[in-house]
Image (spheres, rainbow, N blue to C red):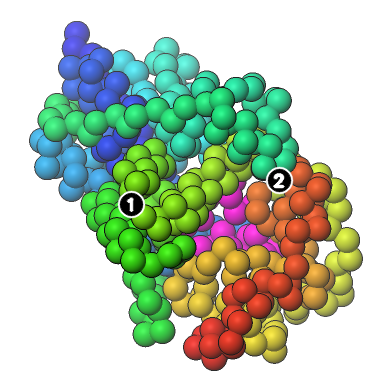
Amino acid sequence: MSKKILVWFRNDLRLHDNEMLVEAIAKSDSILPVYILDRRSFGETKYGTLKTGNIRAQFILESVLGLRNALKQIGGNLLIAEGSPEDIIPQLVQEYEITEVYHHREVAREETHISTLVENALWKLRVNLKHFIGHTLYNKEDLPFPIKDIPDAFNQFKKKIERDSMIKPCFAAPDRINVAEVIDWGTLSSLEDLDLLPQQKDQRADFEFWGGEAEGLAHLQKVIMVMQQAATTKNLILASKLSAWLAMGSLSPRKVYWEIKKMESVPNTKAMFNHILLGLLWRDYFRFMFKKYGNTFFSPDGFGSQGLVDVANEQENFNKWRNAQTGFAVVDAVMTELNQTGFISNIARQTAALYLINNLEVSWVLGAAYFEEKLIDYNPASNWGNWANVAGVGNDQKSKSVFDLDKNIKNLDPKGNYAITWAS
């Protein structure tokens, strides 16, 4: 009997640097690439927000179709189904006589719970679910410490892994693929099918995101072109905006690292290189913190206590904040940009969070849940980890004192132009 491996794609929608895909091709006669649209990822949360808003939903749909097109170009395809993975994958295993299932391991509670449900269902069929790690710059097994001993302070984490760990080279993208015979590869739902409306482009936005590996790789090259032009501009630091493709796994963090590292010798690019690398390291840090501490990051009290919460006016204040109606110009500008585009800079995120927590005295988890809905580059570890830190309930309690709203506003909008541009 021929060996068939089902490759379950989740937040890893790419061909390049995809160990799971490379190994599946090498160890099978044919593979069955599968993406499952799980409606639970588009429902309402207990905070009254959506798990996925229209902007990120559109980006996800584009990313899935981008993967299907990429697979078609090398002789394959992507089976697209809608429903619960724990129901659909066992059905596919039986229908196509699958011998093993591959997928990338996640770290947040909902994603890992679904993996467990799938694993339990496959166990009844005596089929193995093999886990791969492909979301981080540094592999877990290459860290200079076990997960339980990872330093809580980011600077210590950064110092130790940069000194004692290595970043592995990328896996090459396959150029040919042999897939199982499938009569109906399925169609992908539209935004309307998900009860969401398309977002109208805001003319104030200076950038437009399009989902998919090809778009991500093309944008990475544009970032590198900017770095090349930096030979005549000292200390150039621009927002790379690579995070949306990294969040969907359409770009590998190692691919980003090795591509920008080629620019290391170009004059005046060091600041930009360090800026991008720092972002990749923060992504790794929060992901490993989630591995270390599990779901503590989703608790309102986290590792400490936020402090005052104005329970009586909390919902009203939260609504003013998310609707950009606080009356505080810079914060309203940040929230308008977020609502209209799905993307704001890191300092803008901190500014909005500090105002919600300290000035409006709203529980930080409401803000984190709203960012989950709105951010095009949302990933659980970075979003909830960053919010917990700003609220002073993160695992590194020494970071409480590093956030300053007035300082943030001066850096974000020193001349007041940002507030004017994004006045709602």
Tally of numbered tags: 2
Q: Main secondary structure of the magenta part?
A: helix
In front of the other: label 2 or label 1?
A: 1
Q: Amino acid at mark 1?
A: Val
Calculate the distance from the C-alpha at mark 2 to the C-alpha at mark 1: 40 Å
- Please indicate whether residue 62 sits to the left or right of residue 52 in the image: left
* Label 1 CA crowd tier, 10 Å (few <14, some 14–19, many 20+): some
Q: Is residue 244 left or right of residue 13?
A: right
Q: Quadrant of the C terminus?
A: bottom right
Task: Please say if 149 is above or below 344.
Answer: above
Mark 2: give few (<14), some (14-19) or many (20+) Cα within 10 Å: many
- Residue 382 is a magenta residue: yes
Which residue is nearer to you in this view: 42 or 412?
412
Q: Is residue 108 above or below residue 337?
A: above
The residue that label 2 is drawn on is 297
Give the residue displayed 19% in from the left and 12% down from the top.
2
Image quarter for residue 346?
A: bottom right
Report if residue 234 lies within the magenta region.
Answer: no
Residue plotted at (31% across, 15% down): 99
Q: Give the residue at mark 1.
A: 266
Tell me the SS state at disc 2: helix
Q: Quadrant of residue 391?
A: bottom right
User: Which of the two labelled residues, at mark 2 and mark 1, occupies the earlier sequence position?
Assistant: 1
Residue drawn at point x = 47 percent, y = 17 percent: 123
Q: Is residue 188 visible?
A: no
